[in-house]
């Protein structure tokens, strides 16, 4: 007798095949029959025509800290995700010496928009090395399958301490870093991740450690993938990082290179397509490269207390290390403001904010008449420069004014073109990070609902493939991401007519009562991980044990 049979479903195999109606059976956590299933089961679900596909593989998350206190990886477990890849951009919490814990948490607070109070109250620091971290995740359990990168900034901090944010590494330090990366890969890390993005700043406005790495350091550490015989190199690319260099790394290591974050800017509309074209040309030469793109518009809620939208600007660096009155004084300085305005006015290949003030709104203010109106409109009415109006409003309200900015991916025609590019990887949910700024953990449901059903950019079967077998194949995740006999039963049951992500809302369920933005699933009727149901149409359900696994073996 089967453990589970799902009958009368529209089967999307995750491989892009034409959908067919049929049944699916599961025993001992694996798919045992497809098509027509005879016989009974301990549990039978009548799908009544709903779509059944492999669970979503979210290849870009930052649950490294949250998973130590929240094994459900909320909200991803409710949003159709069955496998999460953590440790992206090099922002991990292992390896970490006891004396560096506060430094690491402060960096995460700045670079990933996390609450320091929540991190201090929530993280269970019972590990030091990457192997120990993976072992602890296994012993605690999780609702989802999890794979983890070895993160560059953590490795650099472990070897160099405070100097990690100050200088290039010596030859001996690079050798020490190589040893740690190889240890992590042999213990089951899915690859090596880093960032060279100027938007990635840590505590006090100092660059995140990986940004101080020279090309020889990157070449040496990425080279560990070839020695280990498996793994993906993932980086969030800054403008100074040459695509030709990344192609060299792909050629030397024979390993895939994931280039993030490719987002469309209306003020530099060709840049993302130039990057995708360069990746396509590299693939034509036999390399394995993909561009990580988002299917979601990048919008952020923020206050001037933590204005992530501006922190990548060179002119804003003068304000980053300041606190209290010194910070407020800097925001009021004419020379500071003029420098920011001048930089925004200059064209840039990629940055978060490009002076589109009509896409910045006041969300919460003591002056209620300003809410839901754009800074462009308000500044024009007041006869002011937009930056001056915004900063003066925030200063008058003790920096508590909440703004919302639609930053990138606002041109739907351009985003649709990106999603159709054969060299693009649907990615960049950032789930687990920027908790007070935005929430794109429901990116997969957005792809299925908005881009497939509403816009028709991708057929449903292709949308399912882009969320499942495509990332599984690239990352070497074996026997997941497709409905195939003998494969692990990671499943998503949904209504194609209603599937989507709900509106964002703020909850206060982080450790120390700290807030985060979340979103509910629409049209999701069930999620199974390794054959065990964790979600029904009402949301997460009580389960006997956590069915997720820490993935530590990957295809070569």
Image (spheres, rainbow, N blue to C red):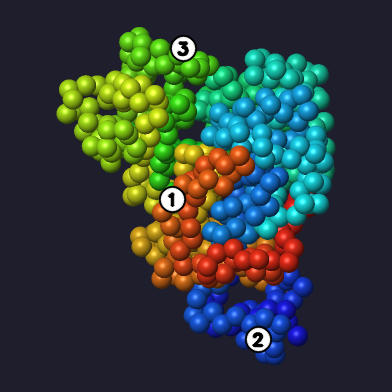
Q: CA distance from mark 2 to mark 1?
A: 40 Å
Q: Secondary structure at mark 1?
A: strand
Residue 132 % position (x, y) = 82, 41
Look at the numbered discs 2 and 1 and tell me whether their residues touch, using CB distance below 8 Å. no
Which tag is nearer the camera, tag 2 or tag 1? 1
Q: CA distance from mark 3 to mark 2?
A: 70 Å
Which tag is nearer the camera, tag 3 or tag 1? 3
Q: Residue furthest bottom?
A: 39
Q: Earlier in the sequence, mark 3 or mark 2?
A: 2
Q: Is residue 495 visible?
A: yes
Left or right position of 269 against 118: left
Question: What's the residue at 70%, 76% (across, down)?
Answer: 26
**Foreground of the two, 450 or 107:** 107
Which tag is nearer the camera, tag 3 or tag 2? 3
Within 10 Å of disc 3 (Cα), the crowding (few <14, some 14-19, many 20+) is few
Residue 181 % position (x, y) = 77, 34
Question: What's the residue at 75%, 55% (across, down)?
Answer: 141
Name the residue carrying label 1: 504
Left or right position of 359 against 6: left
**What label sits on residue 326 in the rendered view?**
3
Q: Secondary structure at mark 3?
A: helix
User: Which quarter of the figure has residue 482?
Assistant: bottom right
**What label sits on residue 37 in the rendered view?**
2
Q: Earlier in the sequence, mark 3 or mark 1?
A: 3
Question: What's the residue at 49%, 80% (across, down)?
Answer: 49
């Amino acid at each position: 007798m089967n453990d589970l049979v799902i009958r009368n479903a529209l089967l999307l195999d995750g491989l892009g095949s034409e959908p067919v109606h049929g049944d699916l059976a599961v025993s001992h956590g694996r798919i045992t029959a497809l098509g027509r299933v005879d016989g009974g089961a301990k549990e039978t679900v009548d799908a009544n025509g709903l779509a059944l596909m492999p669970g979503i593989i979210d290849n870009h998350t930052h649950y490294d800290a949250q998973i130590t206190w929240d094994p459900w990886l909320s909200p991803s477990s409710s949003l159709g995700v069955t496998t999460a890849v953590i440790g992206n951009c090099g922002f991990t919490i292992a390896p970490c010496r006891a004396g560096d814990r506060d430094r690491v948490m402060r960096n995460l607070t700045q670079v990933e928009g996390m609450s320091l109070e929540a991190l201090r109250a929530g993280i269970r620091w019972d590990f030091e090395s990457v192997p120990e971290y993976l072992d602890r995740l296994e012993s605690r359990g999780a609702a989802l399958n999890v794979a983890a990168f070895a993160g560059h900034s953590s490795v650099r901090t472990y070897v160099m301490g405070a100097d990690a944010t100050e200088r290039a590494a010596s030859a001996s330090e690079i050798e020490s870093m190589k040893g740690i990366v190889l240890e992590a890969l042999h213990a089951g890390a899915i690859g090596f991740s880093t960032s060279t993005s100027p938007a990635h700043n840590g505590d006090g406005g100092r660059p995140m450690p990986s940004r101080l790495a020279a090309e020889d350091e990157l070449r040496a550490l990425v080279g560990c993938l070839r020695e280990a015989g498996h793994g993906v190199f993932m980086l969030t690319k800054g403008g100074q990082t040459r695509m030709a260099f990344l192609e060299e790394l792909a050629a030397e290591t024979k390993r895939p290179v994931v280039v993030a974050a490719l987002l469309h800017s209306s003020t530099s509309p060709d840049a993302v397509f130039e990057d995708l074209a360069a990746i396509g040309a590299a693939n034509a030469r036999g390399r394995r490269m993909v561009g990580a793109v988002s299917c979601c518009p990048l919008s952020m809620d923020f206050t001037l207390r933590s204005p992530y939208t501006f922190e990548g600007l060179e002119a804003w660096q003068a304000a980053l290390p300041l606190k209290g009155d010194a910070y407020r004084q800097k925001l009021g300085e004419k020379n500071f403001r003029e420098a920011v305005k001048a930089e925004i006015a200059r064209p840039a290949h990629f940055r978060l904010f490009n002076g589109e003030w009509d896409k910045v709104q006041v969300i919460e203010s003591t002056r209620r008449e300003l809410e839901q109106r754009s800074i462009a409109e308000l500044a024009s009415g007041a006869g002011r420069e937009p930056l001056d109006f915004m900063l003066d409003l925030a200063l008058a309200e003790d920096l508590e004014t909440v703004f919302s900015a639609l930053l990138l991916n606002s041109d739907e025609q351009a985003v649709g073109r990106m999603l159709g590019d054969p060299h693009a990887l649907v990615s960049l949910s950032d789930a687990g990070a920027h908790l007070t700024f935005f929430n794109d953990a429901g990116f997969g449901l957005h792809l299925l609902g908005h881009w497939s059903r509403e816009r028709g950019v991708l057929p449903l079967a292709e949308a399912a493939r882009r969320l499942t077998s495509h990332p599984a194949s690239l990352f070497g995740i074996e026997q997941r991401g497709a409905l195939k006999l003998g494969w692990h039963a990671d499943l998503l049951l949904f209504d194609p007519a209603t599937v989507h992500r709900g509106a964002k809302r703020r909850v206060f369920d982080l450790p120390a009562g700290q807030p985060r933005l979340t979103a509910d699933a629409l049209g999701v009727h069930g999620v199974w991980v390794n054959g065990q149901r964790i979600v029904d149409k009402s949301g997460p359900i009580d389960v006997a044990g956590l069915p997720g696994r820490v993935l530590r073996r990957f295809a070569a």
